[in-house]
């Protein structure tokens, strides 16, 4: 009877922890969904493009006030490394993209916000990067924020310097730290094995020593007691 009372007391507690455990992933999932669809995060573009591969020129400009309706178009400008002025590269307006710079004909694709005129992601994609694509890119949003009784125009913009490399280069620090990781893992394991062998030897040697010692001790005690006995006998 007291046992049953205890379990019935426990079971709601257990139930709620189980429920929490089940709910936690759901909550995390919901959070992720919210992050994917709701919040806008301004991620900086990569700056190292690999020749003959595709490359995404990232340009994200979040609205400060998500609830305000807006209209935006995006223009990209390009200045090659040996040029002094920007030239018009690409334009995205009314859900239609247009390549303006002849050097990029057939090589650019829209990678930004789709099916909306309220653009927040103005990224474009270079299909086949050449070394001549090295240079400075600028993306300029032209955003009209529509408040109930007035409109407000902003032109957030970003400048990205792109370097074209033959292959993905890794930072020296990254390579060095990976090497150091392997060295330390192998080194520590080797040390562990050596230490284990050493300890094993020491313990087995100590064991033999102890055996020998205890035998010697036994003999010593035996002879001592014999001596004592002799002494006692002498005293008597
Ligand atoms: C990319 O362009 C180079 C020449 O610029 C060409 O040799 C190569 O086949 C192209 N690659 C793709 C995937 O189009
Ligand atoms: C939004 O922009 C498009 C062109 O960019 C224009 O046709 C449309 O009228 C604009 N909408 C509003 C409400 O201003
Ligand atoms: C960007 O566009 C390219 C070419 O159209 C496509 O292969 C790639 O998946 C797109 N990336 C994103 C994130 O939309
Ligand atoms: C790169 O530019 C140079 C000179 O501006 C030109 O001769 C060459 O054909 C260009 N290469 C490509 C792949 O467009
Ligand atoms: C670029 O943005 C800055 C603020 O970040 C602004 O002051 C400047 O006028 C913008 N440039 C253009 C060309 O719109």
Image (spheres, rainbow, N blue to C red):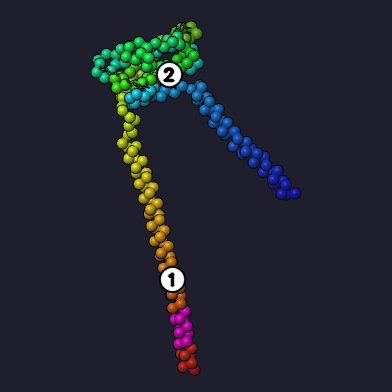
Quarter of the image where one finds residue 210: bottom left
Q: Which mark is residue 21?
A: none
Please provide percent x and percent y for residue 7. 69, 45
* Residue range (magenta): 217-228
**Helix, strand, or loop for circle 1?**
helix
Disc 2 target residue: 111
Q: Residue at x 33, y 25 (%)?
A: 51
Sequence-wise first label, 2 or 1: 2
Question: Which is more toward the observer, 73 or 130?
Answer: 130
**Number of callouts:** 2
- Is the CB of mark 2 within 8 Å of ligand 3? yes
Q: Would you place residue 207 above or below residue 18 in this image?
A: below
Residue 187 counted in the magenta span: no
Q: Is residue 135 visible?
A: no
The answer to whether residue 42 is above or below residue 96 is: below
Please name the residue shown 67% across and 42% down the image. 11
**Circle 2 sits in a helix, a strand or a loop, which is it?**
loop
Could you tell me residue 129's position as x and y percent? Answer: 34, 21
Question: Splitting the image into four quadrants, where does ligand 4 fall?
Answer: top left
- Furthest residue to the right? 1
Residue at x 48%, y 13% (from the top left corner): 116
Say few, some or many: other residues with alpha carbon within 10 Å of mark 2 (under 14 / 14 to 19 / 20 or more): some
Q: Report the magenta stretch's main SS.
A: helix
Ligand 3 within 8 angstroms of badge 1 C-beta? no
Image location of residue 105, percent across then percent down:
35, 13
Give the residue drawn at x 34%, y 17%: 138
Instruction: Evaluate whether residue 128 shows in this view.
Output: yes
Occupied quadrant, residue 22? top right
The reply, left or right, for residue 69 in relation to residue 170 is right
* 175 or 151, nearer to the observer: 175
Instruction: Give the residue at mark 1.
Output: 208
Query: Residue 157, percent across and down?
Result: 36, 16
């Amino acid at each position: 009877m007291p046992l049953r009372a205890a379990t019935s007391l426990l079971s709601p507690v257990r139930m709620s922890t189980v429920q929490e455990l089940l709910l936690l992933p759901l909550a995390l999932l919901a959070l992720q969904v919210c992050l994917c669809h709701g919040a806008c995060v301004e991620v900086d573009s990569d700056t190292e493009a690999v020749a003959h591969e595709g490359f995404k020129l990232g340009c994200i400009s979040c609205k400060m006030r998500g609830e305000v309706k807006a209209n935006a178009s995006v223009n990209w400008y390009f200045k090659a490394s040996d040029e002094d002025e920007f030239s018009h590269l690409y334009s995205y307006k009314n859900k239609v993209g247009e390549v303006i710079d002849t050097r990029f004909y057939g090589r650019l694709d829209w990678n930004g916000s789709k099916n909306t005129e309220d653009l927040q992601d103005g990224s474009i994609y270079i299909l086949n990067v050449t070394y001549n694509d090295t240079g400075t890119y600028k993306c300029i949003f032209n955003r009209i924020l529509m408040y109930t009784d007035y409109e407000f125009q902003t032109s957030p913009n970003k400048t990205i310097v792109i370097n074209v490399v033959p292959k993905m280069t890794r930072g020296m620090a990254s390579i060095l730290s990976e090497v150091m990781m392997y060295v330390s893992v192998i080194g520590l394991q080797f040390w562990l094995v050596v230490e284990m062998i050493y300890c094993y030897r020491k313990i087995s040697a100590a064991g033999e020593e102890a055996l020998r010692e205890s035998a010697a001790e036994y003999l010593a005690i035996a002879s001592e007691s014999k001596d004592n006995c002799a002494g006692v006998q002498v005293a008597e």
